[in-house]
Image: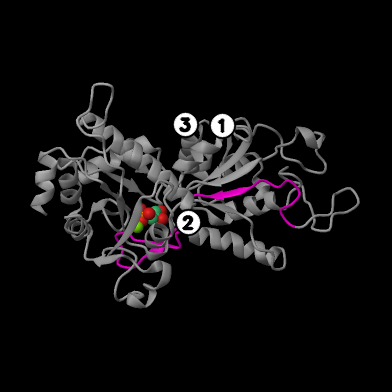
Amino acid sequence: YSTKNEEKAALKEAPSFAFAFDIDGVLLHVAKPIPGATEALQYLNEHNIPFILLTNGGGKHETERVKDLSSKLGLNLTTDNFVQSHTPFRQLVDGPDGLKDKTILVTGADANKCRTIAETYGFRNVVTPADILVSHPSVFPFDPLLDYVHAATARPLPAPIYTPSSAAPLADCLKIDAMFVFNDPRDWALDIQLVTDLLLSRAGYLGTYSPRNGDAALPSCGWQQDGQPPLYFSNADLLWSTGYHLPRYGQGAFQAAVAGVWRRLTEGHELQRRVIGKPYSETYRFAERVLTEHRHELLRRQGHVGDGGGGRHVPSTLKSVYMVGDNPESDIAGANGYASEVGTAWSSVLVRTGVWSPERGGDEVLKGRFKPTAVVEDVREAVRWALEREG
Ligand code: G3P
Ligand code: MG
């Protein structure tokens, strides 16, 4: 790496650049570190160059995932500089439209683990597909794939499910106020059944049906306009890079399946959904705030930031961030399309160790918003390239 940065680090001059690293396909293939990943992060740590980890992955609470990453990469990572797909869902708990006390349906790989994450974020009434299935097995006509998981994790529902014959008045029945996909569901059939049941329901009451041109008792409405619960996805990745030599389906494939069933069911209506994660600017804005805060903390610890004790240098603003990723659709397009709220220039560096490769899509796909600032072999080369550029 360039020695000039070593001199700057020695002078304790705050670097005015930082990195954002994607994880799958850049640092890890699932559990296996990609060669050079640890060395690259170690170098940045030793030279006080800030970075964050910005992944569309999820399914574990940030504290657990960071512990896991630290042991896999052999580094001491913290949640200060870590953003995963569902981290921004935390912002939906409080505030005037907060969902803290509302009833939400949460699904994902281990839906019970996702429920724990949601509860740790502050959501207080979390229902999983297993809760519904165990309480009402007839809601899903097939042998459940994960019945042992359902039996071990299901909780009683907070209210009965509406059935025309049930005595309970509608107002006392289970009403889902929002639906969240925290990460890649395993039982797509059950999840699609329940999500579309709720999208067809009257105002989120599970077991009711609100036809498009409502009968006299129902307000006639277009689809998803009768108070049905909003549907949040945490990640749009159709593909991601694992230990297999070809990319695998990500949460974006599940989203496409839900949208496909919904289109059939409603004769062409496009599924209305809210999607976060890369490439969406909302996620990059969230990540930039985390990175800025983390950098200030680093600088304060190095005595740069005036903390009343007369820090030696007022840190230069963060002039540039290098987003190192493997997926043109999420990492590259996201960095290219993000207009920083603090004037930071985001550059995109594409590595050959993940979803994209010269053989799979090649330069053909690297056009327009998918065109990276640079294409390099791997994360080590990405850091080297950026340091050269910073001089
Ligand atoms: O589920 C993880 C996958 O969607 C991609 O993760 O780290 O490459 O953004 P990452
Ligand atoms: Mg990736």
Q: Quadrant of residue 214?
A: bottom right
- The residue sitting at 22% across, 61% down in the picture is 378
Q: From which residue to which does the magenta span run? A: 223-251
Residue 152 vs 307, above or below: the answer is below
Mark 3 nearby-residue class (10 Å; few <14, some 14–19, many ≥20): few
The amino acid type found where label 1 is placed reads Asp
Q: Residue at x 73, y 42 (%)?
A: 205
Out of 120 and 93, give the one closest to the viewer.
Answer: 93
Label 2 C-beta lies within 8 Å of the nearest ligand 1 atom: yes
The quadrant of the rendering that contains the N terminus is bottom left
Spot occupied by residue 2 in the image (x, y as percentages of width and height): 11, 54
Q: Classify mark 1: helix, strand or loop.
A: loop
What label does residue 94 carry, if any? 1
Name the side, left or right, on which 81 lies relative to 34. Answer: right
Q: Which residue is mark 2?
A: 251
- Amino acid type assigned to the residue bearing label 2 in the image: Gln
Residue 339 position in % (x across, y down):
44, 54
Helix, strand or loop under label 3: helix
- In percent of width and height, residue 91 lies at 51, 37
Q: Label 3 vs label 2: CA separation?
A: 22 Å
Task: Tell whether position 242 is magenta.
Answer: yes
- First in sequence: mark 1 vs mark 3: 1
Q: Quadrant of the C terminus?
A: bottom left
Residue 35, above or below 374: above
Asked which quadrant contains residue 337, the reply is bottom left
Q: Main secondary structure of the magenta part?
A: loop
Per the image, the residue denoted by label 3 is 120
Does residue 269 appear in the picture of this structure?
yes
